[in-house]
Amino acid sequence: KAGVTQTPRYLIKTRGQQVTLSCSPISGHRSVSWYQQTPGQGLQFLFEYFSETQRNKGNFPGRFSGRQFSNSRSEMNVSTLELGDSALYLCASSIGTGGNTEAFFGQGTRLTVV
Amino acid sequence: AQSVTQLDSQVPVFEEAPVELRCNYSSSVSVYLFWYVQYPNQGLQLLLKYLSGSTLVKGINGFEAEFNKSQTSFHLRKPSVHISDTAEYFCAVSDGAGRRALTFGSGTRLQVQP
């Protein structure tokens, strides 16, 4: 069974640009969550999608957005990039939305903003 | 609101020695508890989880953890570590109210020396 696939693995963008990251969950998983990992702030929850609907959102500015498609694939978008957006962005998929369901993580997309 | 505290940022240990990585949490509701491991340039892999029942939980790679409700702790242990256990370890909680979002601790870097 294929794991969670995130593309691209590495990305370099210029301040002020926008970026779109993609996540393909494990087959049959309908919940996709996104996390940001930085040395200073650690791992922080961005948002969760289930059946194309955003169910939960972390404490991030509106420049961070996401969506989920009918095949459960998800994208997250960051507009007007800032240097502080440089981070490893991790996607996790789960069968369901309960807090007791296991989250399977992808390898992440390393975003560098210059 | 929930929070997770990992008391040690780095733990150096010699190969074949026992190790304990400490985790304390704070929450106003019941929680589910998880330990994840992250190898360099990789995503997160679930080591073990506590959902309910027996407070001693066994995971992969010989790791185990004990849930202590009165001390709000969920310490990770391994009786004999290997060089290959060198990695970053994260303790995380999700709330029992059904929200999928994970709150992570700041991580503990386990450095196994020969």
Image (cartoon, rainbow, N blue to C red):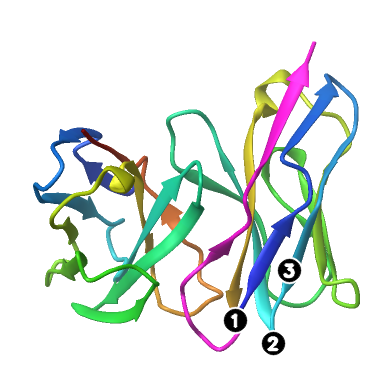
Q: Do the residues labelled 2 and 1 touch (CB within 8 Å)?
A: yes
Residue sitting at 40 percent across and 76 percent down?
A96
- The percent position of residue B102, horizontal first and vertical second, equals 52, 67
Looking at the rendered structure, the secondary structure element under dot 2 is loop
Residue B78's place in the image compared with A77, above or below, is above
Write down the residue under mark 1. Answer: B1
Tag of residue B25: 3
Residue sitting at 29 percent across and 71 percent down?
A30
Q: Quadrant of the C terminus of chain A?
A: top left
Looking at the rendered structure, the secondary structure element under dot 1 is loop
Amino acid type of the residue that numbered disc 2 sits on in the rendered structure: Ser
The reply to whether the magenta stretch includes residue B106 is yes
Residue interval drawn in magenta: B96-114
Q: Is residue A2 visible?
A: no
Task: Specify which label sits upstream in the sequence, 2 or 1.
Answer: 1
Relative side of A37 to B103, left or right:
left
Relative side of B8 to A54, left or right:
right
Alpha carbon of mark 2 to alpha carbon of mark 1: how far?
7 Å
Same chain check for tags 3 and 2: yes
Write down the residue under mark 2. Answer: B28
What subunit carries mark 2?
Answer: B
Alpha carbon of mark 3 to alpha carbon of mark 2: how far?
10 Å
Looking at the rendered structure, the secondary structure element under dot 3 is strand
